[in-house]
């Protein structure tokens, strides 16, 4: 990418380590539009914002080129960088209170893009049986924004194709791999269950760990007033995930533990229903900071 030079008549030009498009569209307040930034360490950061013609054509071409260039790169929507940078006070790059040069200085790729691939996902089918399916992903990476690290990924449990997430990791140390970053999102009880070969499934930020907990034990706790039984119990403060049947421990050594069976559904239909079957599962939230659900150029 040549800096400060462009061919006459073209609508693409490079300046200061950034490849721009001259086009203005869809009421954009900020122009020109950055398509690609060369970070200080020489790695490339592609702007994964949803864009329209002709920038969509430029973006597709850039994605193809960097994928096959052998250069280390990442694909992150600049809208999500803006949201993370400002603590969600600003969620649009057009209104970002910083420049492309600030991105070059304050953003880096801790783990470059893992490339376009298919991921194998394990989940329960409608009969409550464990099965696998293949999910298409693009550009999974770990990005540093100022002094925080984020997983940049597409959620394979999402009902909508291309649902992008930027998820803050609660660490001040760069993970050594994308797999290590994903493990940082798992609470200890999930890692322990997986180490012992127990079935673990996920819907969004919630994990469900299969247990051998007898119904009699849970209902006994309910009868003693140690736990409460709820139907259509809503999880978390945001209230986007609902359990068909749940037992929530209120006191004692299990205080705060949640067990569920039946269906876990997303109240806004962002995820397919997760069928837990008749077996009781322990429900736990992942370990993360802020999460930004924005649509990037991944479908």
Image (cartoon, helix red, strand yellow):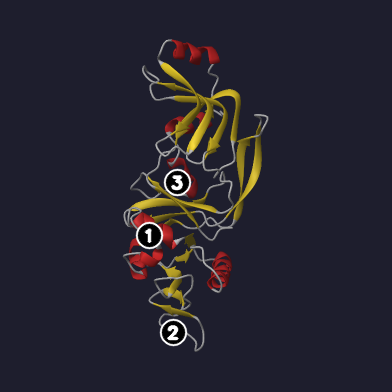
In the image, residue 159 sits, relative to residue 126, either above or below, namely below
Check disc 3 and report its element: helix, strand or loop. helix
Residue 208: x and y in percent read: 52, 31
Instruction: Pick whichever, 70 or 240, lies toward us.
Output: 240
Q: In the rendered structure, are the residues bearing label 1 and label 2 in contact, judged by CB atoms less than 8 Å apart?
A: no
Check disc 1 and report its element: helix, strand or loop. helix
In the image, residue 52 sits, relative to residue 240, either above or below, namely below
Q: Which residue is mark 2?
A: 5
Disc nearer the start of the sequence (1/2) = 2
> Residue, x 49% and y 87% (percent of image)?
7
Check disc 2 and report its element: helix, strand or loop. loop
Q: In the rendered structure, are the residues bearing label 3 and label 1 in contact, judged by CB atoms less than 8 Å apart?
A: no
Taking the image as shown, residue 274 lies to the left or right of residue 109, namely right
Q: CA distance from mark 1 to mark 2?
A: 27 Å
> Residue, x 33% and y 53% (percent of image)?
87
Disc nearer the start of the sequence (2/3) = 2
Which one is closest to the eye, mark 2 or mark 3? Answer: 2
> Residue, x 40% and y 42% (percent of image)?
288
The quarter of the picture where the C terminus appears is: bottom right
Instruction: Pick whichever, 285 or 122, lies toward us.
Output: 285
Q: Which residue is mark 1?
A: 82
Which disc, if any, is residue 181?
A: 3
């Amino acid at each position: 990418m040549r800096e400060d030079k462009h061919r006459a008549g073209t609508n693409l030009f490079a300046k200061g380590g950034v490849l721009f498009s001259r086009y203005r569209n869809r009421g954009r307040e900020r122009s020109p539009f950055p398509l690609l930034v060369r970070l200080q360490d020489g790695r490339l950061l592609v702007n994964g914002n949803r864009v329209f013609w002709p920038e969509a054509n430029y973006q597709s071409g850039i994605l193809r080129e960097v994928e096959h260039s052998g250069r280390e790169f990442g694909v992150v929507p600049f809208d999500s960088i803006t949201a993370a940078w400002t603590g969600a006070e600003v969620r649009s790059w057009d209104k970002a209170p910083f420049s492309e040069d600030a991105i070059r200085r304050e953003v880096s790729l801790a783990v470059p893009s893992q490339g376009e691939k298919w991921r194998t996902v394990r989940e329960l089918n409608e009969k409550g049986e464990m099965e696998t399916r293949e999910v298409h992903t693009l550009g999974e990476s770990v990005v540093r924004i100022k002094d925080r690290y984020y997983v940049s990924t597409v959620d394979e449990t999402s009902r909508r194709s291309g649902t992008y997430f930027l998820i803050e990791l609660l660490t001040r140390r760069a993970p050594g791999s994308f797999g290590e970053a994903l493990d940082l999102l798992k609470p200890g009880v999930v890692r322990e269950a997986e180490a012992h070969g127990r079935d673990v499934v996920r819907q969004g930020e919630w994990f469900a760990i299969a247990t051998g907990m007898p119904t009699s034990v849970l209902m006994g706790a309910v009868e003693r007033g140690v736990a409460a039984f709820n139907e259509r119990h809503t999880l978390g403060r945001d209230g986007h995930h609902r359990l068909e049947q749940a037992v929530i421990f209120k006191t004692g050594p299990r205080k705060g533990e949640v067990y569920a069976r039946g269906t876990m559904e997303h109240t806004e239909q962002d995820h397919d229903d997760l069928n837990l079957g008749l077996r009781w599962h322990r429900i736990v939230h992942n370990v993360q900071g802020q999460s930004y659900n924005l649509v990037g150029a991944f479908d």
